[in-house]
Amino acid sequence: MFNEITLGQYYQTDSVIHRLDPRVKLIATLAYIISLFIVNGWAGYVLAALYLVIVISLSRVPFHYIVRGMKAVMFILLITILFNLFLTPGTPVWTLGPLTLTREGIVFAVKMAVRLTFLIFGSSLMTLTTTPNELTDAMESVMGPLKVLHVPVHEISMMMSIALRFIPILMEETDKIMKAQIARGADFESRNLMKKIHSLVPLLVPLFISAFRRANDLAMAMEARCYRGGEGRTKMKPLAYRGADAAAYVFLALYFASCIVLRILGM
Amino acid sequence: MALRVDDISYEYEKGTAMSVHALAHVSVNIPDGQFIGLVGHTGSGKSTFVQMLNGLLKPSEGHIYWNDQDIHADGFDRKKLRADVGLVFQYPEHQLFEQDVISDVMFGPRNLGFSEEECRKRAEKALRSSGLSEEFWKQSPFDLSGGQQRRAAIAGVLAMQPKVLILDEPTAGLDPRGRDEILDMVRGMKQQLHMTILLVSHSMDDVAEYADRIIVMNDAKILMDGSPKEVFARYKELEAVGLSAPQMVYIMQYLRECGLPVRTDILTVDEAAEEILRHRGELHVQ
C-alpha cells in the first residue's frame, strides 16, 4: 500500500559514495544546501548541477529512482512556483484579473524551482546512500561538541534512530489493522470528510496501543541489556576517516570555494 | 454458498527484481459445512491465500467465485462478501479499539447498516458463542486477559454472522490451555452455527482432531488436499517440506516397528490409548 514512497529510503548498492564516511555525506549535504543559496547567477547553477551529476553518477543510484522521490514533494514545489510567479513585484508582463505576472517573478520562480529541485535531489542522495544507523552515528559525532553546552546529543540521535527504525514496522502494522477492520466491514474510502475522520478511530486507536506496547517492550529490552545512555558507550563500528573521505572533503571545499567566487563575481 | 478458487496466482513487488510469488496457480473448492485445516509453514502463502478469499487482496491472475459470482467483477458487493466470509486475522486482539467489549463486537454489524437493536442482539449472540461470560461485556477490552481479548475479537467477526469463518493462526501465542479452549470454541461454533470453517495453522496437532479435510500448502502451491488420514499417511512427504504429522502418528508407527500390530491411521490421544489397550499383552519384550 505504501511502496510508492521512495523519498528518504536507502538504496542498497556498492559505490564510492555509499562507502564514504557518513559524516562526510552529512557535512557535504549541509554545505551543498548552503551553496545553493550562495550562488545567484546562471553560472553558479550550472556548477551546482555539475556537482549533482558527478555525485549521482558516482553513487550508482538509478536516476529514475531519485526522480520518483520527487513526486511526493511535487505539490509543494508547484505552489512555491505559482506564488513566486504572481506575487513578486516588478515590471508587469501579463495580467489576468487580480493576478500580475512580472518579469522579476518569472526569473525568481525559475531560480526557486531550480534551487528546490537541486535541494531535494541533494538531500535525498544522502538518505539513498546512507543507512539510517550510519546517519545517526554521523549526527552524534558531528554534534559532539554541543555536549559542552549540555545538549543531550546521544539521546537525540538514539531517538532518531529508533524513530527511523520504527517507520517500516508501523507502516506494516497500519496495513494489517486496516485490513482487519475492512474485514469487519469498515470503510476507509468514504469521500465525506466527517465520515472519513470518524472511520480513522478504529485504525488509530489500535495503532497507538501497538506503538506504546512496542515502545514498552523495547525500553524493557534495552534496560535488560544495561543501556544507560551515552556515557562511556563504545561502538561496534566506530567511524574512521579514510583516504577517500579526505579526497571528498577536498572536492567539496573546491566546489564550495568556487560557489563563493562566482557569487562575488556576480555570475 | 460455496467458495471456488480457480487457478489464482499472486506476486509481491510485481515487475521489480524483488518480485516474489506468494501464490502460484492455486485452485480449491470450499463447499458448505466443511471444517478445513489449512496447514503450511511460515511463508508458504497461506496468509496471502486467505486474504484473497474475502477480497482483501486481488489475485494477479485467476478468479474467485462466491456462489458462482466472480468477486472481482464490476458491481459485486464486496462489503457483503466480507460479512459472508468472515476473516479473523492473526493476533486479532490487536484490532480492538472501543471503550467496552460489546461496542467493539457491534462494530461489524454497525458497518453492515443494521439497527442498533439488531447490532446488540447479534453482538450478544456472538459473545455467547465465543464463550466470554457476561461480566466482561461492559469492561474495556484492554482490561481483559490475552485469551479473553482474543475471544472478544473473534466475536467481533462472528457478529457479522458469516457463512464461512476463516481463522488465521487463532492459537498463536496462547498457552496449551488457551489453545485447547480456542479450538474447542471453534468446534462448538461449527456444530451450533453450521458454518464452514477454514482453520489456518502451522501445527498439524491443532487441526488433526477437528478437521474433516486438510489442505497442505508449501512454496506458494497446494501440496496435498484430502482427509486427515490420507494426508498423514504421507507423513514422510510432510517431513520433507518441514512439517510433521501429529505426534500420535509417530507413536503408533514406532510401536508397529517394535512389533505391536497396532493401526497407524490414528490421530488423537484417546484413539491411540484405546488402540494400545486393545493390544495389551501382545508385545513381547525382545
Image (cartoon, coloured by chain):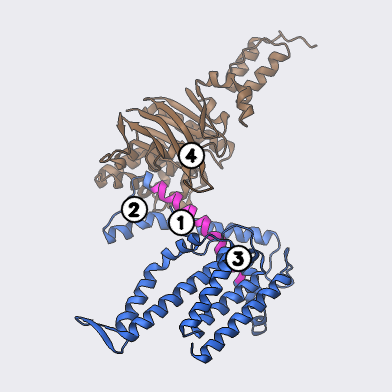
Quadrant of the image occupied by residue B269 = top right
Q: How many marks?
A: 4
Report the magenta residues as a range. A157-181
Q: Determine whether label 3 and label 2 are within 8 Å by CB.
A: no
State which tag comes first along the sequence, 1 or 3. Answer: 3
| Alpha carbons under labels 3 and 4: distance apart | 42 Å
Query: How busy is the neighbourhood of tag 3: few (under 14 within 10 Å), some, or many (20 plus)?
Result: few
Q: Judge if badges 3 and 2 mark residues of a common chain.
A: yes
**Main SS category, magenta section:** helix
Q: What residue is pinned by disc 1?
A: A207
Instruction: Give me the chain that's blue.
Output: A
Q: What residue is pinned by disc 4?
A: B47
Which disc, if any, is residue A188?
2
| Alpha carbons under labels 4 and 2: distance apart | 22 Å
Q: What residue is pinned by disc 3?
A: A58
Q: Residue furthest right?
A: B286
| Alpha carbons under labels 2 and 1: distance apart | 15 Å
Chain under callout 4: B
In percent of width and height, residue B61 lies at 40, 37
Query: How busy is the neighbourhood of tag 4: few (under 14 within 10 Å), some, or many (20 plus)?
Result: some
